Image: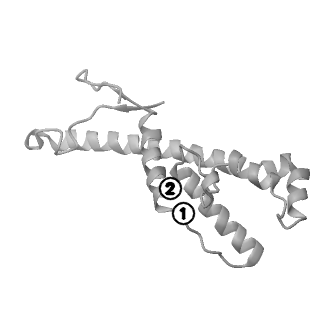
Amino acid sequence: MIEITKSETADTRACDFSKVSEETLKQSSETHIGDVSRGLAFFGALLAEAAVTHDSDKLSALAHFHSDFVTGFKTTGWWDNHRKITRHHLQAADGVPPDVNLIDVLEMIVDCVMAGMARAGKLYPVAIPDDVLKRAFENTVELLKAQVVVKPNDRGEGREV
C-alpha cells in the first residue's frame, strides 16, 4: 500500500485558497511531491518486475519454443501459450489480458524496439488498438488507486480511497 497524507490546501478546487499561507502551500506541495514520488516508485517496481520476468518461458520451455521456432512458427503450440501467459503481446486479441495496463504497453514497446533493432536493424510497425490503449489507461488508474491509503493529517482528516 502507498500511504499518502490528506492535503486539501494545495488545490484551489478543494480549499479556500485565499486563506492558505505561503508556508502551508509549501508544506502541501512538498507532501504532494513525495506522494507522486511514491506512486512513480510503485510503477517503477512493476516495470522492474516486468524486466525480470519478460519472456521467461523462452528459457523455461526452451525445447517447446525451439520446436516451434525451427518450423518458422508453422507449428504454434509454444507461441499460442506464450501469448496467454505473458502480458505484452497486445497486437493479438488473445494476447491482451483483461486487466491490461500501461506497464504492459511499455513492455510491448520496449520488446518491439529491442527485437526489431537487434534482429533486423530496423523497427517494424508497432501499433496497439485504440480500445486496448484506453482500457490500459483506465486499468492503470484503478491499479494505482487500489494501492493508495490516505492517512490523516495533523487536523485528523483522512480516509481510504
Label 2 element class: helix
- In the image, 58: left or right of 144? right
The answer to whether one can see residue 156 in this image is yes
Image quadrant occupied by the C terminus: top left
Residue 64 pos. (x, y %)? 88, 51
Q: Nearer the viewer, residue 75 or 47?
A: 75
The answer to whether one can see residue 52 in this image is no
Label 1 element class: loop
Above or below residue 44? Residue 158 is above
Residue lying at the far left in this picture: please name it.
Answer: 18
Which residue is rendered at x = 63% and y = 49% of the image? 87
Residue lying at the far top in this picture: please name it.
Answer: 156
Which residue is rendered at x = 77% and y = 55% of the image? 79
The part of the image, by quadrant, that contains residue 106 is bottom right
| Residue neighbourhood size for the residue with mark 2, other residues' Cα within 10 Å, grouped as few (<14), some (14–19), many (≥20) | many
The answer to whether mark 2 and mark 1 are in CB contact below 8 A is: yes
Residue lying at the far bottom in this picture: please name it.
Answer: 121
- In the image, 4: left or right of 80? left
- In the image, 141: left or right of 53? left
Hey, what amino acid is under mark 2?
Val
Q: Which mark is residue 80?
A: none
Residue 75 pos. (x, y %)? 84, 59
Residue 143 pos. (x, y %)? 47, 40
Residue wearing tag 2:
132
Residue lying at the far front in this picture: please name it.
Answer: 74
Above or below residue 73? Residue 80 is above
Hey, what amino acid is under mark 1?
Ile
Residue wearing tag 1:
128
Q: Nearer the viewer, residue 111 or 1?
A: 111
Residue 142 pos. (x, y %)? 43, 40
Q: Nearer the viewer, residue 156 or 141?
A: 141
